[in-house]
Image (tube, helix red, strand yellow):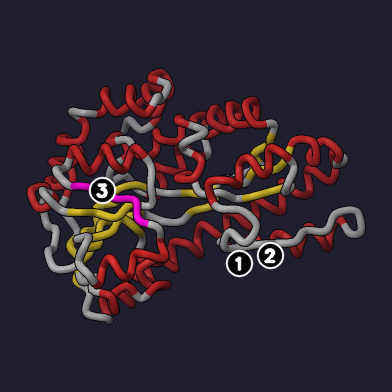
């Protein structure tokens, strides 16, 4: 994703020079992930591309993508919602609450799965009692509780030591994250590839800065962003596939549940979906609309 944002920055700087120059600060160099929305809102930076998991505390509607409704769903089905009416409604609410504008299409991280150390997961019952590290979010905590597991939010710098000490049994993440940190060298051996959820990145830009641009400049920026977003989505998919192959090459074992097992897990989760909607403060009408859009 950073590479595509950098390409976008170069193209905008070239196209709109000397009036607009874009500088990129990756890896939370300026602000912590959870601080980014307020940084854009307050004008400390003009633009950011935070992950949906970092925006959930401010935008409960984004927890929609963590509901059992979307468990096991494909990339295309997630895009169907984020690119359609559901995504536009969420964006409009973000814009009205935080004096920002959503620039265009969301970029992809890729499906998150559960990776474990010594105990492989092959079915619903195998989740019981496991201690799973998550990146954060009430939705993740509640979902694993329903599955019979325990979830913990552990800062990334502390994760390797926790894995080595076997203070956790597994981690909810993507193949690409496993590859980038070479977590197979720290005990991760098994993957349960069930498409737990599909994290994405949302491009936000400060409203005041946006309104100071001409209409022609805004159109150029939107078009340049969407072009990079389309490229990034394909590159993200390829990166996840390559990372999976590398995981296997490093003696990782992958278990892909069949349709019956996925349906079994989704059914177990769906029983608690009404309670999840209430606890996560998601608009019920928004959920109903998403259900209709995902109907065959």
C-alpha span from label 3 to label 1: 32 Å
Of the two numbered discs 3 and 2 in the rendering, the one whose residue sits closer to the viewer: 3
For disc 2, the neighbor class at 10 Å (few under 14, some 14 to 19, many from 20) is: some
Residue 54 spot, x, y in % from top left: 49, 45
Give the residue at x 83% y 63%.
14
For disc 1, the neighbor class at 10 Å (few under 14, some 14 to 19, many from 20) is: few
Q: Nearer the viewer, residue 139 or 215?
A: 139
Q: Are marks 3 and 1 in contact (CB under 8 Å)?
A: no
Q: Quadrant of the N terminus?
A: bottom right
Mark 1 residue element: helix
C-alpha span from label 2 to label 1: 6 Å
Mainly helix, strand or loop, the magenta region?
strand
Q: Quadrant of residue 93?
A: top right
Q: What residue is pinned by disc 2?
A: 7
Q: In which quarter of the image is residue 181?
A: bottom left
Using the image, determine if residue 242 lies above or below residue 137: below
Residue 251 spot, x, y in % from top left: 22, 79
Mark 3 residue element: strand
Q: What residue is pinned by disc 3?
A: 151
Mark 2 residue element: helix
Give the residue at x 52% y 29%.
85
Picture disc at residue 3 = 1
Using the image, determine if residue 88 lies above or below residue 169: above
Q: Are marks 2 and 1 in contact (CB under 8 Å)?
A: yes
């Amino acid at each position: 994703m950073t590479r595509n944002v950098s390409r976008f920055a170069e193209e905008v700087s070239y196209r709109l020079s000397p009036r607009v120059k874009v500088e990129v600060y990756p890896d939370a160099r300026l602000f912590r992930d959870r601080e980014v929305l307020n940084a854009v809102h307050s004008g400390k930076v003009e633009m950011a591309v935070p992950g949906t998991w970092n925006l959930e505390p401010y935008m409960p509607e984004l927890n929609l993508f963590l509901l059992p409704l979307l468990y096991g769903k494909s990339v295309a089905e997630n895009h169907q919602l984020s690119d359609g009416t559901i995504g536009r409604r969420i964006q409009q609410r973000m814009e009205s609450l935080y004096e920002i504008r959503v620039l265009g299409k969301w970029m992809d991280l890729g499906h998150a799965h559960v990776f474990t150390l010594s105990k492989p997961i092959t079915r619903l019952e195998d989740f019981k009692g496991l201690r799973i590290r998550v990146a954060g979010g009430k939705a993740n905590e509640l979902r694993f509780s329903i599955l019979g597991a325990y979830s913990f939010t552990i800062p990334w710098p502390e994760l390797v030591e926790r894995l080595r000490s076997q203070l956790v049994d597994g981690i909810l993440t993507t193949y690409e994250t496993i590859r980038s940190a070479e977590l197979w060298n720290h005990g991760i051996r098994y993957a349960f590839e069930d498409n737990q959820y599909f994290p994405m990145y949302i491009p936000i830009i400060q409203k005041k800065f946006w309104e100071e641009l001409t209409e022609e400049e805004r159109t150029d920026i939107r078009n340049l962003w969407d072009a990079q977003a389309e490229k990034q989505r394909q590159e993200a998919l390829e990166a996840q596939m390559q990372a999976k192959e590398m995981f296997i090459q490093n003696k990782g074992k992958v278990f892909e549940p069949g349709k019956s097992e996925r349906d079994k897990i989704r059914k177990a989760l769906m029983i608690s979906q009404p309670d999840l909607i209430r606890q996560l403060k998601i608009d019920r009408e928004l959920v109903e609309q998403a259900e209709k859009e995902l109907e065959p």
